[in-house]
Amino acid sequence: MSRIAVIGTGYVGLTTGACFAHIGHDVVCADIDADKVARLQRGEIPILESGLDNLVREGLQDGRLSFVVGAAQAAADCDFAYLCVPTPQGADGSADLSYIETAAQEIGPVLPTEAIVVNKSTVPVGSTRVVERALGRSDVAVVSNPEFLREGSAIHDFLNPDRIVIGAEDQAAAVRVQSLYLGITAPVIVTDPASAETIKYAANAFLATKISFINAVAAVCEAVGADIKDVALGMGYDTRIGHEFLKPGPGWGGSCFPKDTRALVRIAEDAGYDFGLLKGVVTVNDEQLHRVAAKVVEVAGGSVAGKRIGVWGLTFKARTDDLRESPSLSVIRHLVDQGAKVRAYDPSSPDALAGIQVVDDPYAAVDGAEVLAVLTEWDEFRWLDLDKVADLMAAKNIVDARNLMDRAALVRRGFDYRGIGRS
Ligand SMILES: NC(=O)c1ccc[n+]([C@@H]2O[C@H](COP(=O)([O-])OP(=O)(O)OC[C@H]3O[C@@H](n4cnc5c(N)ncnc54)[C@H](O)[C@@H]3O)[C@@H](O)[C@H]2O)c1
């Protein structure tokens, strides 16, 4: 079993650290956020991710998982150092590598001889060289091992991946990284760093394309009187297409798709290719946010100025507490800009948000509202008491941006129901 340092304890780092400890490695996770580290040392999990609390507790109790402040402290005694730090969108659309460079600079001087640095952050082609330069160590190999987990099922995805991708110039280093996943059954693709880095961006861009495509087809359905639910079902049974990511909604968001699609457009541009298709995917997504906001305005009678709008769902998807680039927040921003008074509920209990009144009860969110907008696909919304909702609302209007609710049950109660891609 190996000694692994994980740099960054966010959604990816914490999952990686907890899962590697679970399969038997000795893991030290580092972060720059001292409060977060203190909480993790006590077994408190700063994010909502199913099963993560059990794994962290198990690792702490068994002594295979620990948390420290500062990358150097974790890396001083490791065989592998996993970089799991942010790569946000820079001002020009490209990925900002400053966190990666800083982390590499911190661990470079202390890494033991022949340690391997593994990049799990999503980074553009050429980043392996950037890390090598920042490390300043000729005896340390740098390997790309992109992460494909989905928030909300991160532990499951890490332990049961569809594939493991390893990009390395040095084949011996690739084999050593592969050995860390002993016990995890998955196809392993060993390739060069540029291909590994491209796989990650291309996979995310393709998934975003699927969502934008079905959102565009939903717009066609509305125009021609077809029902997107049946259309998507009929398409998805074709095994070349599949059902996954074929659900219309308010658009894609989250911490990855927006920045990764723009980064790939930029990578292509810098390399001399105009990725018009992907630019279109981004445009369709921006339009979708407007389309959903426009539905709320329309059902409110043409204006939301001064009107109370109830919202269910704030996170970018269900079963996570991640609000980064949430389509729900973008739709709400459009409504607030037009004078709406938004009162919102989300099961992840988010902290206060500027311009939105956040409540901890779904019924309080709809009390006195003229429109209810369902913006995130939390399953529990489907089981709420619709009679009570109808009684509480000032007008019975609903925009179901996830096609989640029981349309017939709502119509029976007199609601003006507006879904996506269906009347
Ligand atoms: N979130 C996802 O679903 C997901 C999935 C696959 C890949 N990724 C990629 O993984 C990377 C990390 O994403 P995330 O969502 O976990 O980010 P995050 O923002 O949740 O966590 C990053 C953590 O790194 C810490 N950090 C920053 N600089 C540091 C340093 N020098 N030393 C130690 N810690 C440091 C931050 O304090 C933070 O806790 C990104 O490149 C992202 O694109 C994310």
Image: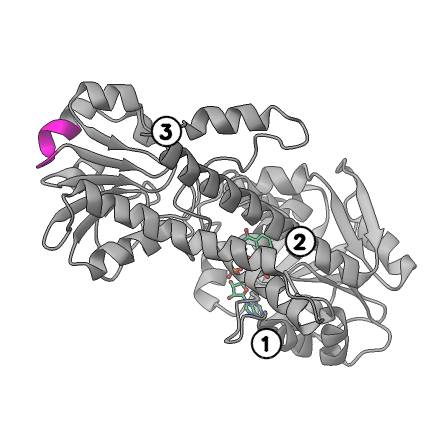
Q: Is residue 282 left or right of residue 157?
A: left
Residue 54 lies, in percent from the top left, at: 53, 39
Q: How is the image coloured?
A: one colour
Q: Nearer the viewer, residue 419 or 274?
A: 274
Residue neighbourhood size for the residue with mark 3, other residues' Cα within 10 Å, grouped as few (<14), some (14–19), many (≥20): few
Residue neighbourhood size for the residue with mark 1, other residues' Cα within 10 Å, grouped as few (<14), some (14–19), many (≥20): some
**Which is more N-terminal, label 1 or label 2?**
1
Tag shown at residue 202: 2
The quadrant of the rendered image in which ligand 1 is seen is bottom right
Rendered view: 154 above or below 324: above
Name the amino acid, label 2. Ala
Q: Residue at x 65, y 43 (%)?
A: 158
Q: Is residue 206 visible?
A: yes
**Which is more N-terminal, label 1 or label 3?**
1
Residue under label 1, please give it: 98
Magenta residues, as a range?
Answer: 389-395
- Mark 3 vs mark 2, CA separation in Å: 34 Å
Q: Secondary structure at mark 2?
A: helix
Residue 36 lies, in percent from the top left, at: 46, 61
Tag shown at residue 225: 3
Residue extending furthest toward the front: 224
- Mark 3 vs mark 1, CA separation in Å: 49 Å
Q: Residue at x 37, y 35 (%)?
A: 222
Q: Choose top left, top right, bottom left or bottom right for residue 256.
A: bottom right
Name the amino acid, label 3. Gly
- Mark 2 vs mark 1, CA separation in Å: 22 Å
Q: Choose top left, top right, bottom left or bottom right for residue 399.
A: top left
